[in-house]
Amino acid sequence: MMAFNGTLWNQLPLEVLEQILSFLPMPDLCRYYTTCKTWNELIKNPAFSVLHVRNRNKHSPFIAIHSISTSIRNGHRRYMDGSQVMCFLDISSKKWYSMKFHDALKTSFLFDHRHFRILAMDGGLMLLKALTRASKSCHHESGCTQLCVWNPIKDMKIKLPCVTNHKSDSLINFVVDDIAETFKVFVIRHEFGESLVVDIYDYVMKEWKTSSKLEMNNTREIFIIQSFVFQNLLYIHCYVMNHGVDEDYELWRYNHLADIWERLHFTEGIYVERDYTQYRWQFIVSGERLFVMCERQWPISHDVFEVHEIDIQSRATKVLLKWTKTHIMTIFGIDVKYYNYNLHIYGVGFNKSLILVSSLSRNVVIFDVETKKTNFEWPQLPLRKLRVEKESYSFIGKQMDFLLPGTLK
């Protein structure tokens, strides 16, 4: 903000002030709407929200990362109290913003990780899942898992209707169209011996609909690894066994507009190996490009990390990056005492780069997918140091354009 004194700001016409504020990034607006009553009313006006959506494209978006410190106790993962942080990276200035419950913006982050979990982020909204059954508000006898869409800036939650036959381990995806001011939620249902089905919630229609069934041979056992939305289509990555024998990985695509399932066949090289138990996968969407990170976790001494780019049209892939475990520990500054731990790498796509973070480090690494160069000169995540044995960071992140009050009512 310009170093004007209060008198000069008060003399600016409201239309000029509105234009100036509309170019500011969201964390700054969250601070400035408490400046005075006039600014508060202006920023919360739906008309200003529309102006901000149009002008925000003229500056860099933010990377949003939700972090919770967790530890393993008696074989189970538990959350560390007071460890939850929302981190926002201003790409252009390389500056982190962090928000905790005790911060000034706590009214915008009334979120308790003991009762809710963030499943997905997109377009300034977050999809939450209740960790307890909502039996009192549900007409089903056993109660249903509650899903809601949350605007963290406005602290507005949109509770979704119940999903029929929803399972606790169902994979859930989320996509926002913030220009049309709408969103869709995808819930993938599959049990052994049954067909794969997707339930789709359309915010415009305010109802759920069920896809056609993806029929599977009774001799084939499917393990769904990950699902993601790319170019407005739902993709499902799964591992298939035939008569209990390892078969292969498969990538399926579902077109919810045409209600059509399609298996995508790739040339050799998309996967490092076929061993389901040894690899951790993460598909990353960055604009109109798709990447997959492959992290080998066993045997520990042979850990390897690779990044592949996937060309959906030609059904081809290429390797962009390959690191050994020793290389990863050096890059992220991980203490040697963690050598026998899994060094989970999380990725978030933005522009022509990937931002990479490790579950055991606060360091941030930027990988340029065009030049294949790695940049280490980025500020650390604004998190506290890991303090106890078997403690690690748990991340979920996305490139975000945050939505002010007045959008997606």
Image: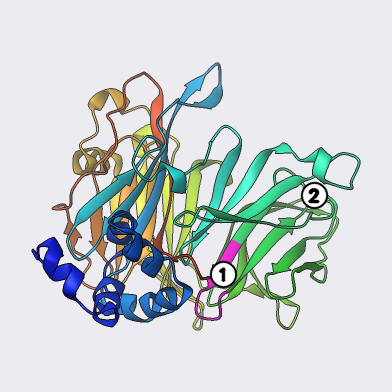
Q: CA distance from mark 2 to mark 1?
A: 34 Å
Q: Which residue is mark 1?
A: 408
Residue type at mark 1 is Leu
Query: Label 2 sits on what residue type?
Result: Glu
User: Does residue 398 appear anywhere in the picture?
Assistant: yes
Is 176 within the magenta? yes
The range drawn in magenta is 174-181
Q: Is residue 219 above or below residue 38?
A: above
Quarter of the image where the C terminus is located: bottom right
When asked about the image quadrant of residue 269, the answer is bottom left
Residue at (72%, 67%) from the top-left corner? 200
* In the image, residue 2 above or below residue 240: below
Q: Nearer the viewer, residue 271 or 203?
A: 203
Query: Percent x, y for residue 287?
Result: 41, 74
Q: Relative to residue 269, is residue 97 drawn left or right?
A: left
Q: Nearer the viewer, residue 385 or 96?
A: 96
Give the side of residue 187 with respect to residue 275, left or right: right
For label 1, the SS is: loop
The quarter of the displayed image where residue 132 is located? top right
405 falls in the magenta region: no
Q: Nearer the viewer, residue 46 or 218?
A: 46
For marks 2 and 1, the one nearer the N-term is 2
Identify the residue shown where x is 74% and y is 45%.
145
